[in-house]
């Protein structure tokens, strides 16, 4: 089973152009200030369909049963969703002047490179958004500049004051404003959210206009390395960095991502992390030089937390015949498995994949992921020679980034035969250094058992953004956990 994919909600210009081409018919839909005019993107953005218009309200703005005249026999019952739409309209009107679109422009050509959303949090013009919306301003300020656009079309430059890579947040300051900015307030931490409480996400989806999306609070995401709110509502590209508010219009989270393999499975950053970053940014000087040093510092903290958590949580054992292989504790990672593969007759092949939700955005790529994978082989009818040839080919065919690119150097690998415990293994460890994240590496560990003529287990550990010493600790921790348990 493939790993599920998260989709950050920053809208890159090429995507916007593609959507415009695929949905030119939607340009004729009248645009209003009501939330129900928000188009909904299908999963994977293969196209866009306009949503239905606003549901009609009962005469006088009331539904039957709220003081209106009794309905005659046989009359159609008003749609209950009208009341919800009125709530969304109220939230929209309360919030619309506090929302901004964040545009990243190429300095020389003055053309848009990416688009996201944000919101005012102070009268002097501080704006909260996602780090992945503002990352080009942090890492390539000589090439890019930022602009904010309000709901009524006011436009001005922004400068980056602070960012939080671990929680995907950034704080900008608007420049040359003459009037105090209208502000969205944060919901107090002591006023906890209730499961199923209705919340509203705001932003500028697909660069077609500001919109509001109704949804529900479904608690925090299980196994997420950092706290994330499970929002039961729709988020679309361009809404990154926009606020999610409660029924009183108070911010409870920041839009960040959605799942590609589901419907209305979206994620918000809890407001407490945005509040902490705003306090840090209040007295900060603008970032005018590439901030790789600060990003590296934050990613170094991230990899240390990741290492500590994995070393403190003992691996669980997964059984494949007499083999015992290490899988992460259920609180750290999700694992999927598959049984016999019909493409390999005469071979009992089982596969397992595990992944920790620990990825973080590092500009135009992600790092911080931890993945484990296993293939267990049992082929008693093949014979030792045929099995050995197939088993060796499987080991040699494992793919990873061998050649360097603009982010990483070429890999450097070391191979040896080891016996860390009860199971002799052939092990290859490969490291690739990040070019601009000094001291951080991507590590791959391949391990294949060598103790049986027609049986074997092949394991793989991938860790991104790890310090060398911590990488060695994790590799040793991983290899020590393999076992062969002979039949009694």
Image (cartoon, rainbow, N blue to C red):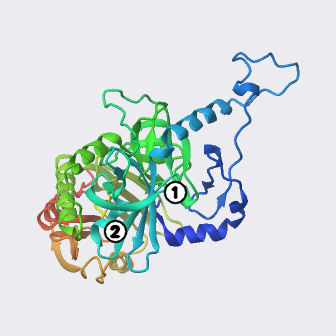
Residue 436 found in image quarter: bottom left
Discs 1, 2 touching: Cβ within 8 Å: no
Q: Which residue is drawn at 36% across and 36% down?
A: 186
Label 1 belongs to which residue? 153
Q: Residue 136 carries which label?
A: 2
Q: Nearer the viewer, residue 424 or 132?
A: 132
The image shows residue 69 at horizontal and vertical percentages of 79, 16
Residue 157 found in image quarter: bottom left
Q: What element carries label 1?
A: loop
| Residue 425 visible in the shown view | no
- On screen, residue 127 versus residue 451, left or right, reads right
Q: Is mark 2 on a helix, strand or loop?
A: helix
Of pointers 1 and 2, the one earlier in the residue sequence: 2
Q: Residues within 10 Å of mark 2 (few under 14, many from 20)?
A: many
Residue reaching furthest front?
A: 178
The image shows residue 318 at horizontal and vertical percentages of 32, 51
- On screen, residue 319 versus residue 112, left or right, reads left
| Residue 78 visible in the shown view | yes
- On screen, residue 174 versus residue 477, left or right, reads right
Q: Which residue is drawn at 65% across and 48% down?
A: 32
Label 1 vs label 2, nearer the camera: 1
Above or below, 56 against 355 in this view is: above
Above or below, 79 against 483 in this view is: above
* Tally of numbered tags: 2
Q: Nearer the viewer, residue 86 or 456?
A: 86
The image shows residue 259 at horizontal and vertical percentages of 48, 53
């Amino acid at each position: 089973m493939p790993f599920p994919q998260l989709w950050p909600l920053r809208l890159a210009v090429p995507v916007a152009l593609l959507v415009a081409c695929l949905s030119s018919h939607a340009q004729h839909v009248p645009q209003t200030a009501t939330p129900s005019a928000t188009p909904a993107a299908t999963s994977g953005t293969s196209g866009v369909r306009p949503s239905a218009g606003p549901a009609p309200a009962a005469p006088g703005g009331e539904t039957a049963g709220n003081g209106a005249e009794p309905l005659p026999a046989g009359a159609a019952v008003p749609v209950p969703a009208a009341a919800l739409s009125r709530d969304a309209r109220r939230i929209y009107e309360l919030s619309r002047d506090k929302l901004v679109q964040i545009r990243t422009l190429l300095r020389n050509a003055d053309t848009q490179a990416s688009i996201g959303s944000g919101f005012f949090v102070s009268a002097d013009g501080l704006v909260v958004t996602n780090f992945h919306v503002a990352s080009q301003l942090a890492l390539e300020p000589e090439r890019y500049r930022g602009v904010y656009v309000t709901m009524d079309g006011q436009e001005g430059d922004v400068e980056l004051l602070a960012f939080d890579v671990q929680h995907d947040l950034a704080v900008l300051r608007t420049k040359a404003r003459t009037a105090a900015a209208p502000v969205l307030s944060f919901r107090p931490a002591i006023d906890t959210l209730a499961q199923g409480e209705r919340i509203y996400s705001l932003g500028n989806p697909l660069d077609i206009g500001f919109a509001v999306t109704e949804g529900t609070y479904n608690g925090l995401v299980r196994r997420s390395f950092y706290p994330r709110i499970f929002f039961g509502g729709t988020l679309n590209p361009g809404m990154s960095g926009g606020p999610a508010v409660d029924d009183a219009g108070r911010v409870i989270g920041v839009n960040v991502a959605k799942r590609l393999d589901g419907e209305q499975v979206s994620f918000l950053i809890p407001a407490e992390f945005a509040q902490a970053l705003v306090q840090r940014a209040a007295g900060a000087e603008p970032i005018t030089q590439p901030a790789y040093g600060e990003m590296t510092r934050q990613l170094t903290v991230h990899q240390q937390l990741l290492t500590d958590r994995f070393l403190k949580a003992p691996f669980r054992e997964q059984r494949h015949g007499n083999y015992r292989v290490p899988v992460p504790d259920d609180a750290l990672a999700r694992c999927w498995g598959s049984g016999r593969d019909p493409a390999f007759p005469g071979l009992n092949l089982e596969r397992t994949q595990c992944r920790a939700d620990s990825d973080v955005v590092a500009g135009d790529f992600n790092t911080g992921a931890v993945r484990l994978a296993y293939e267990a082989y049992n082929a008693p009818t093949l014979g030792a020679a045929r099995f050995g040839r197939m088993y060796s080919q499987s080991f040699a065919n494992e793919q990873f980034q061998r050649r360097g690119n603009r982010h990483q150097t070429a890999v450097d690998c070391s191979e040896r035969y080891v016996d860390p415990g009860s199971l002799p293994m052939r092990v290859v460890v490969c490291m690739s250094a990040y070019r601009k994240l000094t001291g951080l590496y991507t590590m791959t560990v391949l391990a294949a058992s060598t103790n049986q003529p027609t049986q074997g287990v092949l394991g793989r550990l991938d860790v991104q953004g790890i310090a060398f010493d911590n990488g060695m600790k994790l590799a040793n921790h991983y290899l020590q956990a393999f076992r062969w348990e002979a039949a009694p």
